Amino acid sequence: MAGEKHFGTALFGFNKQDVNSYIEDLVKRYENKIKEYEAEIDRLTKENEELREKYEKIAAEEERIYQEKERIAEVLIQAQEKAQLMIDEARKKAIEEKNKIQEITEKEKEKLVDMKEQIRALKTVITNTLKKYEEQLDSIASGAFDVNLLDDDRALDEVASSTESEEQITVRE
């Protein structure tokens, strides 16, 4: 059989020296194997410790990165919220400013309409007055002067003075 040891024979059994040397050889081989295994165990233990330390460092780094990402995300969210508030506030101010400008524009349009109306009235009065003066000149030239035409001149003066006072009020506003 393979792996079997053949001992020499002696008077009462196997040769003791062969058996003892075989046993000693077995013990040495097993001790060497045990030392090799212990060395391997020590090496693996050290490697395991190194890997555990690396793992702990990596886990700590991962945790730090995760916390930093969360902090950055929170800061970004806050920045977006602030930016949105600023945009909303700017829109609100723009709408308010637009409304103010529209109010001013509307007032100015009303003033312009009033001024145009005053100009039309003044134009009518001036046209009528010029016609009356023309009639007066014609009547003077023909010799018949009408006293009622002088009353119309007073009415013209009143319209002109009221128009001037309205223009002064408009300018002050």
Image (cartoon, rainbow, N blue to C red):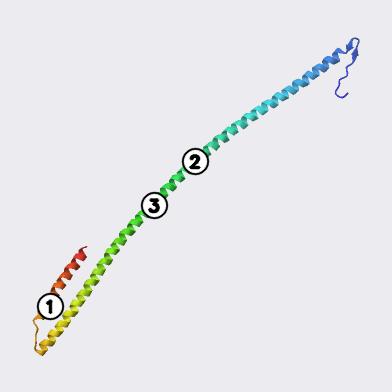
Alpha carbon distance from label 2 to label 1: 89 Å
In the picture, measured across the screen, residue 85 lies left or right of residue 157, that is: right
Residue extending farthest front: 148
The answer to the question of whether label 2 and label 1 lie on touching residues, with beta carbons closer than 8 A, is no
Residue 73 vs 8, above or below: the answer is: below
| Residue at 80%, 17% in the rendered image | 24
Which of the marked residues, 2 or 1, is nearer the chain's N terminus?
2
Q: Which residue is disc 2 drawn over?
A: 70
Choose between 171 and 8: the one closer to the eye.
171
Q: Which residue is disc 3 drawn over?
A: 88
The three-letter amino acid code for the residue at tag 1 is Asp
Closest to the camera, between mark 2 and mark 1, is 1
Which of the marked residues, 3 or 2, is nearer the chain's N terminus?
2
The answer to the question of whether label 1 and label 3 lie on touching residues, with beta carbons closer than 8 A, is no
The three-letter amino acid code for the residue at tag 2 is Glu
Q: What crowding class fits label 1: few (fewer than 14 Cα within 10 Å), some (14-19), or many (20 or more)?
A: some
Q: Which residue is disc 1 drawn over?
A: 152
